[in-house]
Amino acid sequence: MQDLLGLSPLDVARAVREIAAEPFRAAQIFKWIHERRAADFSEMTNLPKAMREALAKDFVIGLPKIALRTPAPDGTEKFLFELSDGARIEAVYIVESKKTPSWTDPETPGASRVTICLSSQAGCAVDCAFCVTGRMGAGRNLTAGEIVGQYLAIARAKSFGPHEANVVFMGMGEPLLNVANVVRALDLLEEEVSPKRTTVSTAGIVPGIETLAGRPRRPNLAVSLSAADDETRTKLMPINRTYPIAPLISALKRWPLERGRRITFEYVLIAGVNDRTADAVKLAALLRPLPSKVNLIPLNESKEWLPGLLRPADAVVNAFAKVVADGGVPVTVRWSKGLQADAACGQLKGREEPRRPAPQAR
């Protein structure tokens, strides 16, 4: 049976033309899947009953199965999904303030907004030292339908409608090692989530960055950096051997930024590894020529998955942020949400057993 989830409106029309020949019927089906969050053809009540029954014989709407929901006290909720081949992935529903907190005032009040953190792969081959997903090793790429399906399944479970959430590709996997399916997912998500409210995070895959740069409507770009020198970054992020800092920054200088937009750099702070004043000075000097901002992320520790890596004290985090800000680069400390549900940055895994001990990054 063919899955309609992940198909463009034109491809849906082509797929169902033997059953629903009129173009408006295909448009109705697409709208039911993407705007009304239908999980079954029986829910499509403005289609004739005979048409719904015929569709159900030949097609499916492949929303991923929710295997587990894990809420956290701060309103975050982690979703464990089981895919059709048994692969398991995680995605996160996050409620946060619309007003971005500063590093000096992490509890800035404000109206809330919803963000959905999506996975692009089952596992990850990039193997960053500070990321639990990297302990799992390489997994398969997700299809566009499996990526969009996470968003739709969470929207159905949490009862939010179109244009009510932001989307970040910051879950399991490296999005730009699955760039073809991520691009197709972006096209589908644009029906209700504008590129200005969509962010793709990458460890610095230069060819993928160049692919995204060529899109007429580009998402926000976030780059995981975590060190301003190649020696330290290679220890933390082995992908730096393939895409070192200099060619990465060169590619980012070519990224076409609209007025008022910046490239975000994510910097995971690890005690005794990349949290010194000298590291902050180098970071500010590297990024100052770019229209950029820095998200500092104190390491989310895991004794089981990331043994030997420790989170810096809050005073160290704030001192690091001040040096970067004084160096002319806007900075925010991301005091992670969802920690109690293992749903924070770098904690997604989809299973419970570590693949192997994490390498020491010192």
Image: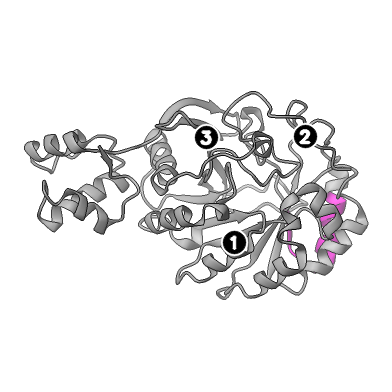
Q: Residue at x 88, y 62 (%)?
A: 281
Left or right position of 111 against 150: right
Which numbered mark, 2 or 3, is in the foreground of this view?
2
- Comparing 169 with 133, the one in front is 133
Percent coordinates x, y for residue 2 in the rendering: 26, 41
The residue carrying pointer 2 sits among few (fewer than 14), some (14 to 19) or many (20 or more) residues within 10 Å by Cα, namely: many
The residue tagged 1 is 221
Is 40 located above or below residue 186 in the figure?
above
The quadrant where residue 61 appears = top left
The residue carrying pointer 1 sits among few (fewer than 14), some (14 to 19) or many (20 or more) residues within 10 Å by Cα, namely: many
Gap in angstroms between the C-alphas marked 2 and 1? 28 Å
**Magenta span contains residue 187:** no
Q: Amino acid at mark 1?
A: Leu
Label 1 residue SS: strand
Q: Residue at x 13, y 43 (%)?
A: 46
- Comparing 75 with 129, the one in front is 129
Q: Residue at x 42, y 42 (%)?
A: 146
The residue carrying pointer 3 sits among few (fewer than 14), some (14 to 19) or many (20 or more) residues within 10 Å by Cα, namely: many
The stretch in magenta equals 318-332
The residue tagged 2 is 358
